[in-house]
Image (cartoon, rainbow, N blue to C red):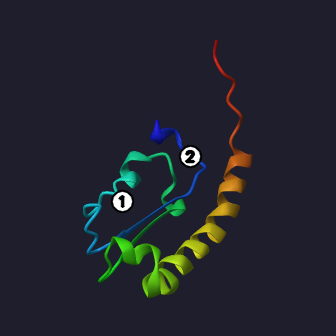
């Protein structure tokens, strides 16, 4: 149940020329994970980039990796604080 995720940050990454995954395929997770607050979501679409370029080379070093680092820093504290505010649910038997 992806909609049950509420304290997990979500970042999706796509290349605009990806020949392996279709356009918006990974970004579709944002609609499925509807419980994740918008401020804890990020979509990265890298221009002039195929699937391989997302994980290696200059686009990885200059665009994707720095964006992921910043996203993680911003959201690791946010997710932790939010999880502290949420009351723990008791399982129903």
Q: Which residue is mark 2?
A: 6
Q: 73 above or below 86?
A: below
Report the Cα–Cα distance between label 2 and label 1. Answer: 17 Å
Give the residue drawn at x 36%, y 59%.
27
Numbered badge on residue 27:
1
Give the residue drawn at x 44%, y 47%.
33
34 or 59: nearer the viewer: 59
- Horizontal and vertical percent position of residue 50: 31, 75
Closest to the camera, between mark 2 and mark 1, is 1
- Horizontal side of 51 relative to 71 (left or right) equals left
For the C terminus, the quadrant is top right
State which quadrant residue 21 falls in.
Answer: bottom left
- Horizontal and vertical percent position of residue 42: 47, 66
Which one is earlier in the sequence, the residue at label 2 or at label 1?
Answer: 2
State the SS at label 1: loop
Q: 25 above or below 44?
A: above
Q: Residues within 10 Å of mark 2 (few under 14, many from 20)?
A: some
State which quadrant residue 73 falls in.
Answer: bottom right
Q: Residues within 10 Å of mark 1 (few under 14, many from 20)?
A: some
- Horizontal and vertical percent position of residue 16: 28, 74
Q: 69 above or below 85?
A: below
Q: 84 above or below 67?
A: above
Give the residue drawn at x 51%, y 51%.
36
Q: Please state the total of marks drawn on the protein image.
A: 2
State the SS at label 2: loop
Q: Are marks 2 and 1 in contact (CB under 8 Å)?
A: no
- Horizontal side of 45 relative to 37 (left or right) equals left
Give the residue drawn at x 51%, y 38%.
4
Numbered badge on residue 74:
none
Q: In the image as oriented, which residue stretches furthest toward the right? A: 84
């Amino acid at each position: 149940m992806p909609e049950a995720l509420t304290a997990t940050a979500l970042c999706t990454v796509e290349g605009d020329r990806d020949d392996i995954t279709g356009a918006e395929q990974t970004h579709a997770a944002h609609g499925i994970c509807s419980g994740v607050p918008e401020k804890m979501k990020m979509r990265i679409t890298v221009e002039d980039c195929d699937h391989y370029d997302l994980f290696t080379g200059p686009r990885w070093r200059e665009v994707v990796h720095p964006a992921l680092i910043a996203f993680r820093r911003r959201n690791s504290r946010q997710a932790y604080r939010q999880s502290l505010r949420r009351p723990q649910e008791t399982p129903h038997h």
